[in-house]
Image: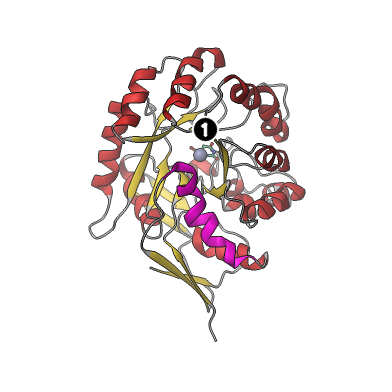
Amino acid sequence: MSQSLTIRRPDDWHLHLRDGAMLQAVLPETARHFARAIIMPNLVPPVVTGTDAAAYRDRILAALPDGMVFEPLMTLYLTEDTDREDVAAAHASGLIKAVKLYPAGATTNSASGVRDFDKVRGVLERMAEIGLPLCVHGEVTDAEIDIFDREAVFIDRVLDPIRRDTPGLRVVMEHITTSNAVDYVKANAQDLGATITTHHLIINRNHILVGGIKPHYYCLPVAKREEHRLALRAAATSGDPRFFLGTDSAPHTDPLKESACGCAGCFTATNTMSLLAHVFEQEGALDKLEGFASRNGPGFYGLPVNQDSLTLTKGEVVRYPDKIDTGDGPVTVFDPGFEVHWHVTT
Ligand code: DOR
Ligand code: ZN
């Protein structure tokens, strides 16, 4: 007898869609299963103003194939020059659902991010007033901090001070990778949530480095030790509403990944729902998948849960493409390293 599970249609609370030919190719991979996604603003140049976000939203909607329904939830890229009233107006009009904080230099296209956190204090205070969440890439960038410690150090040195200085600011710790982040979320009852990616539930740092370097497993924040992966699995499958899915699906073409200085990002849009069903089944928590993928995110953002549904059915091995062809070149789909049997039907 085949096992099946029907859940409300999921959303992706952290997604990179890029622009142009790449956007055209990767958007259907997300829209096939997800109703909405929080769209990352780290384009070149970044999406900084309300005007930029409106134009980007229109390009996304124009790239959506006929017959697909998808709502991009737009964000602004926080810079030291961001105008708080532009942010407030973009929020009031319903255009944006969050502002994204990249510490300058932390990751792909983050050069325009924040160096001096005092310079964004006014924007953060305005966001706290109007209830607009701040999505945070939580890594320090100091050269002397080991890359595997950058998330934990960020929590102590940057995030906790910002939250203490800005009461009422709603914060999403994005793509958390450590037990430190899980513990920090659990210890803070109010105004704090965290997204967890599909790939960080599946790989630890050995997967990247043992037996040869695997560029398609390299992302930021980089996967940590096994104990951290297990802490993420426990958090995601716990039913705690502060943890929800943000895939951080981040396409780069193969030549840019398979390079002497490869780009960070795992492309998981295509197979995320099958992989999550596999992970949640392994954890004996299939009943918690709907909360993680479809309910907790809307709960945090104050949005309705999707009305339509998605069904996962266990059967033969699921076949999905190794690569997606894009006008910019091939993009490799995340390979979990095991077979999955959960088929998605909508
Ligand atoms: O792995 C990542 N890729 N992490 C990020 O923070 C950015 C993203 C990208 O834009 O490629
Ligand atoms: Zn990201």
Magenta part mainly helix, strand or loop? helix
Residue 57 in the image: state x and y as whole percent.
Answer: 29, 39
Q: Is residue 74 left or right of residue 246?
A: left
Task: Say whether residue 294 is magenta.
Answer: yes
Q: Is residue 48 left or right of residue 299?
A: left
The residue to which callout 1 is attached is 170
Which residue is painted at 34% across and 39% down in the image? 19
In this picture, is 184 found above or below 309? above
Q: Is residue 28 left or right of residue 66?
A: right
Residue 272 in the image: state x and y as whole percent.
Answer: 51, 58
Residue 302 in the image: state x and y as whole percent.
Answer: 43, 43
In this picture, is 179 found above or below 238? above
Residue 177 in the image: state x and y as whole percent.
Answer: 65, 43
Which residue is painted at 27% across and 27% down in the image? 51
Image quadrant holding the C terminus, namely bottom left
Q: State the extent of the magenta-drawn residues as a range.
A: 285-302
